[in-house]
Image (spheres, helix red, strand yellow):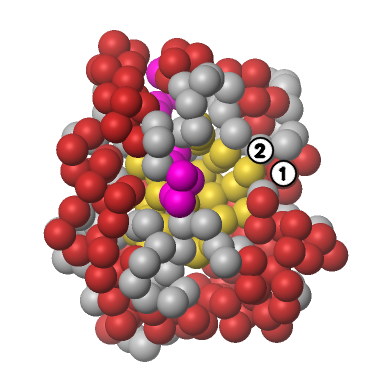
């Protein structure tokens, strides 16, 4: 039984004061939700304040990225150890916006995953195809390529224990921020493909235990049907995570039936 994991990716939104207002609301409304792990990924500037505010709650804090070196002359970067120090337990790695706008590659994703895990962070690793790739029937090929990058940074001998430290997010790029969600069947097809890939290339135990979130225009009105699919274990939520009411509704919809 995989405990669903729902994470709000706030992207380039919210000051420290706004972040605190939102997480205080989430803590009040979701503090007693036991069947779903809930996380927030604020911008770097708000991480420490948010982590402090959530210290005595079940909500977890994630960064939206991290660098692969611990220290050095890398202006503008933030290391996994610094994120731990700021109170982060997780790091989102390989988000399509990083791939699209900031030159993230499968190679850099692998390095980041490896460094994050070594520093004791959990990793939420994103994979997913663009619209052109879906239309060109290369979805599985692209997802497989992304998974190869992610797992190049992972010691695959850890079996089911890996699931405590790695979560995958299937995020079709054409569904991110577009209001165009994958249908539950479209999402399930790729999630099942990912689980089969894990069984073949990592281990059967890891395939059974690793959570695979869906991301791409998840909203209160479509969350429940997506979450009902057998291989969807939560959500990575962008736009709808910026308002407490919407995000709370999505987290509640992720509860197992
Ligand atoms: C995301 O940024 O990971 C995402 C899924 O965004 P949205 O929910 O806005 O599509």
Picture quadrant of residue 223: bottom left
94 magenta-colored:
no
- Residue in front for this viewpoint, 38 or 138: 38
Q: Is residue 85 left or right of residue 63?
A: right
Q: Is residue 174 left or right of residue 154?
A: left
- Viewer can see residue 168: no
Dot 2 lies on which element? loop
Residue at 68% in and 80% down:
199
**Quadrant placement of the N terminus:** bottom right
Label 2 lies in ligand 1 vicinity (Cβ under 8 Å): no
Residue at 46% in and 22% down:
54
Can you give x and y, in whole percent of width and height, for residue 173 in the image?
32, 63
How many marks the image carries: the answer is 2
Residue 29, compared with residue 118, is above or below; it is above
Can you give x and y, in whole percent of width and height, for residue 3 in the image?
52, 57
Residue named by callout 2: 121
Label 1 lies in ligand 1 vicinity (Cβ under 8 Å): no
- Residue in front for this viewpoint, 173 or 219: 219
Can you give x and y, in whole percent of width and height, for residue 45 in the image?
42, 17
Residue named by callout 1: 117
Dot 2 surroundings within 10 Å: few (below 14), some, or many (20 or more)? many
Residue 116, compared with residue 227, is above or below; it is above
């Amino acid at each position: 039984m995989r405990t669903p994991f729902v994470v709000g990716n706030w992207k380039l939104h919210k000051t420290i004061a706004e972040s605190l207002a939102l997480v205080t609301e989430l803590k009040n409304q979701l503090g007693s939700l036991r069947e779903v792990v809930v996380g927030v990924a604020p911008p770097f500037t708000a991480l420490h304040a948010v982590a402090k505010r959530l210290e005595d709650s079940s909500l977890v804090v994630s960064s939206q990225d991290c660098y692969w070196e611990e220290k050095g002359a890398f202006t503008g970067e933030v290391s996994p150890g610094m994120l731990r120090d700021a109170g982060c337990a997780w790091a989102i790695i390989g988000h399509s916006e990083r791939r699209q706008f900031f030159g993230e590659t499968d190679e850099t994703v692998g390095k980041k995953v490896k460094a994050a895990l070594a520093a004791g962070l959990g990793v939420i690793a994103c994979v997913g195809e663009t619209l052109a790739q879906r239309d060109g029937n290369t979805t599985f090929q692209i997802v497989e390529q992304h998974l190869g990058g992610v797992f190049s940074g992972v010691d695959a001998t850890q079996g089911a224990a890996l699931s405590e430290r790695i979560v995958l997010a299937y995020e079709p790029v054409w569904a991110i921020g577009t209001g165009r969600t994958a249908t539950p069947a479209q999402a399930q097809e790729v999630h099942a493909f990912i689980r089969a890939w894990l069984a073949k290339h990592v281990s059967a135990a890891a395939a059974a235990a690793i959570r695979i979130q869906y991301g791409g225009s998840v909203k209160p009105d479509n969350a429940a049907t997506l979450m009902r699919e057998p291989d969807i274990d939560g959500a990575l939520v962008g736009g709808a995570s910026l308002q407490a009411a919407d995000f709370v509704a999505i987290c509640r919809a992720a509860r197992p039936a």
